[in-house]
Image (spheres, rainbow, N blue to C red):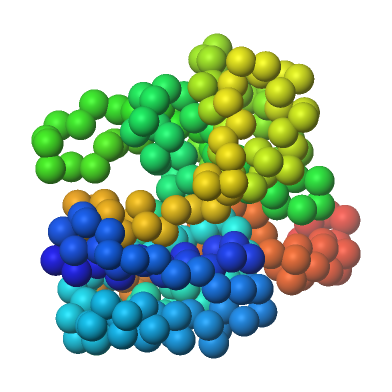
C-alpha cells in the first residue's frame, strides 16, 4: 500500500510518501500563493525521487483544514482529482493531525492551535482513546471541538474541561507561547517540529484510516470552522438589506 499524503492548509505546504506505514520521504514547498503550482510539481518530484509514478500510488491522504481557505481548497481539489482517477481517499483535520503524534507519545491532553489572524486562533483539544485493534491508528478522543475564537476564550475553555493539558502544539502555540505559559505553566509548548500538520505522520498512518466511498468523496468539503472573508462580507451586506422585521 503506497500512500501519498498532502497538506496545503498552511503557508508551508507538504507532501509525503509511505509504504505500509513506513515513510519514504517528505517534501515542503513555499507560500500559499504558489500552492496551486507547487503542489503538483512537488508530488511529481517526490515520486521521481522514489522511482515511482502516480500509477504506483494506491491511496491519497489529505488535510481538510482549518487553515488557509484557498490552500485547503487546492489540496482537496487535487486529492479529489486523484480519487476520480481511481485512488482511494482518506482525510483528517489539521488540528487533529497537529495533536496526533503528541497524543500518541504522551497519552495526555494535547491542545492544537493555529493562528487564525484577526486576533483569533483555531483550536481544539484531544486525548488518546482506547484503540480496539492493534492495526488501528491511535484513536483521538475530542475533548474540545475545533473552534475559531480569541486565545483568551480558548484558554478559558481548556480550563473549563478541568483537565491538565500536557502540551500545546501548532504555529498558534508558538505565536502565543508567553500567554499560554502564564495560564498553564506546567504544559509543554511543542517546538518547531510541531508547528504545522506533520504530513509524514499522515502518510505513516494513512493506510489505516477509513476510506471514503465515491458518494462521500463528492460530498466532502473543506473544514473552515469560520466563514471566509468573502462570506462574511456577503452576510453583512445581506443583513443591511434585510428589513427590520426580518422579512
Q: Which residue shows up at 77% across the image and 28% down it?
A: 179
User: Does residue 188 sit above or below 10 in this rendering?
Assistant: above
Q: Is residue 59 visible?
A: yes
Relative to 128, does residue 209 appear above or below in the rendering?
Answer: below
Quadrant housing residue 85: bottom left
Compare residues 218 and 104 and report the one nearer the observer. 104
- 154 vs 118, left or right, is left
Q: Position of residue 167 (x, y in %)?
A: 54, 28
Q: Position of residue 11 (x, y in %)?
A: 63, 66
Quadrant including the N terminus: bottom left
Of residue 127 and residue 144, the one placed in the foreground of this image is 127
Q: Residue at x 50, y 69 (%)?
A: 28
Q: How many marks?
A: 0
Q: Which quadrant would residue 120 be assigned to in this image?
A: top right
Give x and y (percent) for residue 22: 22, 56
71 sits left or right of 184 in the view:
left
The residue furthest top is 162
Question: Where residue 217 appears, x then y in whole percent?
Answer: 31, 70
- Residue 152 seen in render: no
From the viewer's perspective, is 198 left or right of 119?
A: left
Which residue: 80% across, 68% down? 233
Up-down relation of residue 121 to residue 246 (above or below) = above
- Of residues 116 and 190, the one nearer the viewer is 190
The residue that appears at 21% across and 55% down in the rendered structure is 21
| Quadrant placement of the C terminus | bottom right
Amino acid at each position: 500500500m503506497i500512500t501519498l499524503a498532502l497538506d496545503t492548509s498552511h503557508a508551508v505546504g507538504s507532501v509525503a510518501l509511505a509504504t505500509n506505514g513506513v515513510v519514504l520521504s517528505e517534501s515542503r514547498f513555499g507560500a500559499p500563493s504558489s500552492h496551486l503550482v507547487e503542489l503538483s510539481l512537488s508530488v511529481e518530484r517526490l515520486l521521481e525521487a522514489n522511482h515511482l509514478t502516480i500509477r504506483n500510488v494506491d491511496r491519497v491522504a489529505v488535510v481538510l483544514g482549518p487553515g488557509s481557505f484557498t490552500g485547503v481548497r487546492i489540496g482537496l481539489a487535487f486529492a479529489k482529482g486523484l480519487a476520480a482517477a481511481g485512488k482511494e481517499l482518506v482525510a483528517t483535520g489539521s488540528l487533529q493531525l497537529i495533536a496526533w503524534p503528541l497524543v500518541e507519545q504522551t497519552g495526555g491532553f494535547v491542545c492544537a492551535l493555529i493562528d487564525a489572524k484577526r486576533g483569533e486562533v483555531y483550536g481544539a483539544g484531544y486525548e488518546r482513546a482506547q484503540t480496539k485493534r492493534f492495526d488501528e491508528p491511535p484513536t483521538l478522543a475530542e475533548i474540545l471541538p475545533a473552534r475559531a475564537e480569541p486565545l483568551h476564550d480558548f484558554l478559558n475553555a481548556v480550563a473549563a474541561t478541568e483537565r491538565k493539558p500536557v502540551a500545546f502544539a501548532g504555529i498558534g502555540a508558538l505565536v502565543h507561547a508567553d500567554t499560554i505559559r502564564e495560564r498553564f505553566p506546567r504544559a509543554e509548548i511543542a517546538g518547531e517540529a510541531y508547528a504545522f500538520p506533520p504530513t509524514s505522520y499522515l502518510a505513516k498512518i494513512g493506510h489505516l484510516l477509513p476510506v471514503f466511498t465515491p458518494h462521500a468523496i463528492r460530498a466532502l468539503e473543506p473544514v473552515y470552522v469560520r466563514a471566509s472573508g468573502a462570506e462574511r462580507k456577503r452576510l453583512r451586506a445581506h443583513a443591511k438589506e434585510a428589513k427590520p422585521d426580518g422579512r
